[in-house]
Image (tube, grey):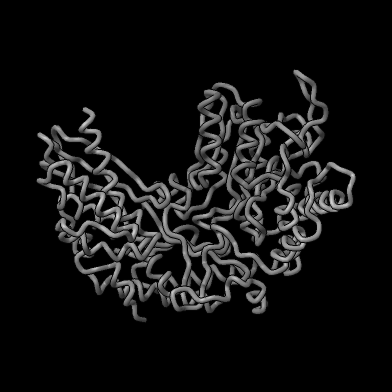
Amino acid sequence: MSFNNLDQLYRQVIMDHYKTPRNKGTLEEDSVNIEMNNPTCGDRIQLTLQVEDGIVKDAKFDGEGCSISMASASMMTQAVKGKDVDSALKMSEIFSDMMLGKEYDDSVDLGDIEALQGVSKFPARIKCATLAWKAMEKGVHEEEKS
Amino acid sequence: MNPEIKSYFPILNQEINGHPLVYLDSAATSQKPTPVIEALKEYYEFDNSNVHRGVHTLGNRATEKYEGAREKVQQFIKANSTQEIVFLRGTTTAINLVAQSYGRANVEEGDEIVITYMEHHSNIIPWQQLAKERGAVLKYIELEEDGTISLENVRAAITDRTKIVSMVYVSNVLGTMNPVKEVAKIAHEHGAVMMVDGAQAAPHLKIDVQDLDCDFFAFSGHKMVGPTGIGVLYGKKHLLEAMEPVEFGGEMIDFVGLYDSTWKELPWKFEGGTPIIAGAVGLAAAIDFLQNIGLDEIEKHEHHMAAMAMDKMSKIEGLDIYGPTDPAKRAGIVTFNLKEVHPHDVATVLDMSGIAVRAGHHCAQPLMKWLDVTATARASFYLYNDESDIDRLVEGLRSAKEYFSDVF
């Protein structure tokens, strides 16, 4: 059986992040801690962010879920680390547009994240990919409030 | 099972992602046969009207059909009278009604409500809410290692403080068929009432509520080839009579004064608002369809499907099946995980091959915790599935395994 269309979803770089996730774990001190789950399927993510002077200094995630949700979390932490909060939120917006199949701002270098573009063709899996980004947005807003 | 049965289900005759559809998600909702679809169409094209009011001919016809459906349900589950059959939206609504009406009136601080680890969320949360409100204790019956329930554990959990025992007849995850008749007996010995969640049982087994001697029994039409939005609460007459309605408005009243009102008699006092008339008509057609084939025949077919699926699936290396290993102890539900491949990924690969299975926690998070997994995949079989569907599933699972071993 051939699965050409599946290859759009499960790109090599995604499976690489799934197999060897970057920034796995939890940050200890001075970090915001966000737990989020996807109630329809049981995916769960715990994200810790260290935000200082408007910069995301460090980010780590832990959790359980499918290849798409865990790979996306790994890529997200990699992408936002070292970015200022506005850029991180801007990236999240671009990612959301990408998932919805909308035109998105391609002036920003998305790196590995680009590989997740194929998810937009699998409506049932979009929520898997956006979970970690939603957690990041929530964490940044919580940090801003405090 | 007659191979022609499939042809009664128009939806099955289509391709999904370039492959003929294999529908293995009937535990979530079943597909609908032509006679049910036709019954709904006929009702709306010829008989549609509101019930129990008006003098005109259509009103009478709609009322006759709606109340005729009630008689059909009464006979289907062998209730003593149509007064014991309440039409509601589904199993969830039925359990909530019992919790909010019977529960609030009978459960006091320190009393116990007993359920099991294998309940669907709809048979957990109404009791959690009731327990919190009344200061009662919610207790869970432990499961055996194979996902069955032992009567010893039931006896250990139910005490004289127990007011309500509520248990699923057939587990939507493990497929386990529970000894609800024996549990009802134990509950009664302690003065508790027994509620049975029959959502996965009514589509597949002959139900006899008087033989089970349960006090309440709930099920949904859409899981038994009927339409969505119609379900049934059965309750023993003396219990329902003593219960207060939880929804108030039109249809359920007898006399309305400025400051006080009285209710209609059973079962209408629980059916506030315009009832689910077309749903009931569709449910009656569904019951006819199932009875023409024979519930015994359907049950036999499902045991056969479960046995065959378990046999063929267990030959796939790295595939774990949850629940009773003895197919005779389970309905046509096989929940599984493929090593190293998350169930969502399994379900996506199968979908690309035209095979529909469920992946996730199946609205049973406490059970997932007990199984020590976050999610599982589930194939559920019904009367329209046959051996070729199992072969397609097994082939799909082998491809999924291969695909993910390649990408790793």
Q: Quadrant of residue B319?
A: bottom left
Left or right of B323: which side holds B39?
A: right
Locate the C terminus of chain B and report the quarter of the image it occupies.
bottom left
Residue positioned most to the top:
B259
Q: Is residue B36 visible?
A: yes
Residue B263 location (% of width, % of height): 79, 29
Q: Is residue B42 left or right of residue B401?
A: right
Q: Nearer the viewer, residue B370 or B53?
A: B53
Which quarter shows the N terminus of chain B? bottom right
Task: Please say whether residue B1 is visible from this viewpoint.
Answer: no
Q: Position of residue B262 (x, y in %)?
A: 79, 26
- Looking at the image, is A38 positioned above or below residue B398? above
The residue sitting at 48% across, 67% down in the picture is: B356
Q: Position of residue B223 (x, y in %)?
A: 61, 57
> Which residue is painted at 32% across and 77% down in the image?
A4
In which quadrant of the rendered view does residue B204 lie?
bottom right
Which residue appears at 53% of the width and 79% of the height? B388
The percent coordinates of residue B32 (x first, y second) are 64, 65
Q: Establish if B226 lies above or below B144.
A: below
Decide if residue B397 is on the left or right side of residue A34.
Answer: right
Q: Is residue B165 left or right of residue B260?
A: left
Which of these two is toward me, B317 or A54?
Answer: A54
Question: Is residue B111 positioned above or below B148 on the image?
Answer: above
